[in-house]
Amino acid sequence: MGLPGALPVLNSKVIEFAVKLGLAINCNLAFNSKFDRKQYFYPDLPKGYQISQFDVPIATGGFLDVDIPVEFGGGHKRFGITRVHMEEDAGKLLHTETGNYSQVDLNRAGVPLLEIVSEPDMRNGIEAAEYAAELQRLVRYLGVSNGNMQEGSLRCDVNVSIRPIGQSKFGTKVQLHSQGQEDQIVQETRLWDEGKLPEEKRRRYEKMGLSMQDVLFLANDKNIAEFFDATLAKGADAKLVANWIMSDIVAFMKNEKLTINEIKLTPEELSELIASIKGGIISGKIGKEILFDLLAQGGSVKELIEKKDLVQIADPVRLKKWWTSDCRESKTGNEVSKGKAILVSLTRSS
């Protein structure tokens, strides 16, 4: 902000985050780096210059691999990263609806900022959106930022250059935050009023035999990915875990407006539930009933099965004894005899 007598002090945390981010997007790190003054006049920059990095940024020459969703054609795309540099944030301009005047919010001025500059590798809006979404996932995985765009924690400056089919050179670029329509492009800058990394997880999930739809969903949210991994660590089958998370568990979370960290179900109990169904102790239908109790109230699978007497009897000897002693002459027994031949055949054969 240029306060009299105030000198800039380097924030050590921003260097740590810059190095972490640079390595995550496969950049080369500069062991000797420096800061520069970017001189320009703007209402949100009261001291008349911005502390930034120009010719020796902290990280250069990287790339980011992105999986395009199946509904948009699928496949993998690599986007080049030109550089990552550190700088200070400027203030925020708040424009009135009438346009008669603007207000300046300087609360974020001087706050450390990391800027990622990409190569011109995106060919349509879908690729640009998926690139931005992957960066958001990445910074959240790394703990560098919460990535919340509505809070200004993640912002995108989009350079659009129109290149007609068959033309080798890019057209004049325009930097903007929201796309409009123009007959002719004029160079300018516009304002908008308003662990393991995801890529590694997606490749690992692919090797487990999961569909790309499952892979993209599970790796999209760090907390969901960690819940999934923790359940697998208890010996559960990957596809079964994915199915339970993406169907009933996510439905419960949406209905109750909860995150996966806020539900009562633990990875250990989900693994136990899947094992109980797979082992024939309970049926899939009973498993769903137990699941909703676990999601809402917690507890253990074994306790709920015993408490509600939900054990599924699958032993032929016990079934035959039950049939001959209690049910053969009852109304239920007659109904079973008439309508469920498979069960009758099973008990008689034993």
Image: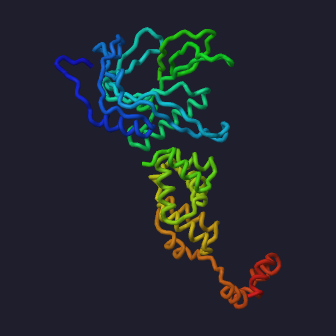
The single residue placed furthest to the right in the displayed view is: 338
Q: How is the image coloured?
A: rainbow
Q: Quadrant of residue 101?
A: top left
Q: Would residue 160 appear left or right of 101 to someone viewing this image?
A: right
Task: Name the quarter where the C terminus is drawn.
Answer: bottom right
Task: Name the quarter where the N terminus is drawn.
Answer: top left
Q: Quadrant of residue 326?
A: bottom right
Relative to 344, residue 141 above or below: above
Visible residue check, residue 89: no
The single residue placed furthest to the left in the displayed view is: 5
Q: Quadrant of residue 52?
A: top left
Q: Can you give x and y, in whole percent of width and height, for residue 209 in the image?
A: 62, 55
Relative to 43, residue 269 above or below: below
Q: Residue at x 51, y 69 (%)?
A: 301
Q: Can you give x and y, in whole percent of width and height, for residue 318 in the image?
A: 66, 87
Visible residue check, residue 35: yes
